[in-house]
Image: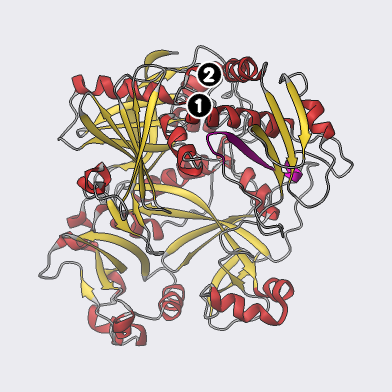
Amino acid sequence: MTNKENLITTNELVGEVYLDKILADYDIFYMDCLDEDNKAAYPSKFLLNDLAESSKGKLLVCYQRVHIGDEWKNRIYVMTAKSNGLTEAKLRNYPVFKRSNLTPAVAVTGKEQISEITTIKLLTMNVPFATLLNQKGKMARCNLLGELFFYIKGINQGKDKKGGHFNRRGQVVLIRLYFDEQSKTMHIANSLFTQVKLFKEQFGKEFKDELADRNLLTGPFYQIDLDDMTIRQCRKMTDDCYLKAPFYKNKKPKAIDGAMKNFALDKDTPFDHSKDGFAYQLLSSFNSYYEGTGYISKLSFKEINAETISAEESSMKLNKKVTRAVADFFKDKKVHFVDQTGNELDLAPVAEYFADKTAEATCADQVKEGFNIVVVLPSEKYEGDDPYQRSNSKCMIQHIYQNNCIKKDGKVKGKSALDNSLKELLVKYCVVNRTVKPLQVKGIPNAEFHYWEKETGTCWSLKFNDEETFGLTKSNQLLDPLSANNPFIQHGLLWEDKKGRMTSSYELLARIDGELYGIKQSKVRTMPNKSLYYKTVEDPEFRYYRNKAGLDEYMSGIVYENHWLEKGCVKYNVGKVGRGMQTTIDKGSVVRIINSFSGDILEEEAEKIYRMLKMTEVTFVKYKDLTVLPYPLKLLKEAARMDLNK
């Protein structure tokens, strides 16, 4: 791979907000949303939304988590044009405001009570978005709970593999506009709404218990009419109203997969029908609406000059390198195949598939010393005692689900998943033997990497002796008297989550040449460049952005590894890889932040960090794609899952 400079785009908003000019024409009030012990200060969301809707644009409402002074607060902001005559005194006559802590934003506390991103969000509520460039079908928009939701008929529906529309009875996917205070970003996300009658059909008489368990029983409830394209909140729960939730907690039904993919970038989708294309259109509508008002300068998404590691090899060649490493290793190794599903499977076809990939592939009744691929059922379907035996230093085990490896007729299924299982066994071997040589990658001599495993409260550490070998250590915060020496505790990087576990925002710590660095996610995402948006304006049928030249010109922040120095930190993202990409891109890649615990990172110091980022240029972690974090994290996580003492 070679380095070059590229202009990439992120979803950070850039532009000046002229609050003095806005406050000359508008009154802005805020209310703090206090805790349950002070419910009197928390206004009724239904009444507030109902009032905003009945005002027909005279009263704009938004909910925002904001940083005021040294603390974060949940706030409701209300904005109205002075010409509407809705003064503070008149607002307090409405029941929803009578018991609230309604406060003018320009009170004694000062204008800092409203941030630029909150002001932009409020102004967005006022934009009609009546027509959208090149969008086919009708569009509905609404302000629910201080957020903007959109529904585009004919596009949100999604299509199945045969090209027909999904029959998503009682489920609707709306696209939602998000603004983040801390990162000053704007992005589009999907929100799933499910009709109450579907919960009744799914859970029967226990449906109310299910809703109560998920805090859904008291709403909010929504009426969504896709015929007249209206979306509004309703007071009572009826069979036909919707809840903003999927069937099962933390799970997304397969029925909505088509809608998710329908907003992704693929070879058949126009850019303006994708989430990022829609974001560009919303920003364009915003700028057009406020042009000449003096409220705000032209908003745009942030452009950055980044150093890009551009792949000289195709993703296919990179994957062949991993395949070669696996083949070289297992050509003289024996692998056992074990059925732990309780279904008395015949794994002979699976063993036969590996016959030319290993020295010997045999079926066994139980795991044995050496390498084992164990077929299991998902935990919720398994009735046995121990379906997930842990690997140890003598017996390495890789689990694979039955439906990922063998069909009902007994034939082999999911060859990619099977190949990945063999690769995972190689990773386990490398952890046990403390070497990366079989993976055909290199380490950084004397570099240390630290990972916090929150389930057991353990810091796992890896230190390279040279480019090939490493050592592993662990320190438990409760059992180890020396635990205070681990960097997560030393630098106060742990906090307690809702389940009472000590966790950290840092995904990985690295000590290079004596300096400690931390890597964590940001809320910033990369986007296609604005040149693609303008190209689509000129030619709505334009699709030629998936070849090598198109990727470099239009999608430079979505592909390869990009890094840059900003405000004393190194920021980077890892995207897709390939010259003529055919894969679907459903979202931009996450921008991660690398900071030093000794102070700001200088340009000359950044070079050694870029050396660490070279460790993302492997495909054995995610298999067939670049890893987003340096590969030692994979080894550390594998060590945490294994019982290395046996």
In which image quadrant can residue 413 be found? top right
Residue carrying label 1: 430
Q: At which x and y percent is residue 312?
A: 50, 12
Residue carrying label 2: 438
Q: Is residue 134 left or right of residue 524?
A: right
* Nearer the observer, 552 or 127: 552
**Residue placed at 53% from the left, 50% from the top?**
131
Q: At which x and y percent is residue 415?
A: 74, 30
Q: Residues within 10 Å of mark 1 (few under 14, many from 20)?
A: many
Q: Is residue 400 covered in magenta?
A: yes
**Residue placed at 26% from the left, 43% from the top?**
486
* Nearer the observer, 581 or 132: 581
Vertical position of residue 522 compared to residue 226: above or below: above
**Residue placed at 38% from the left, 59% from the top?**
501
Q: At which x and y percent is residue 247?
A: 64, 65
Amino acid under disc 1 = Cys
Give the extent of the magenta segment. Answer: 391-404
Q: CA distance from mark 2 to mark 1?
A: 7 Å
**Residue placed at 74% from the left, 74% from the top?**
201
Q: Is residue 15 covered in magenta?
A: no
Residue 565, numbered circle = none
Vertical position of residue 33 compared to residue 66: above or below: below
* Nearer the observer, 39 or 286: 39
Q: Residues within 10 Å of mark 2 (few under 14, many from 20)?
A: some
* Nearer the observer, 473 or 270: 473
Q: How many numbered circles does the render carry?
A: 2
Amino acid under disc 2 = Pro
Q: Is residue 527 visible?
A: no
Mark 2 and mark 1 lie on one chain; the one further toward the N terminus is 1
Asked if the residues shown at circle 2 and circle 1 are in contact, with their CB atoms under 8 angstroms apart, the answer is yes
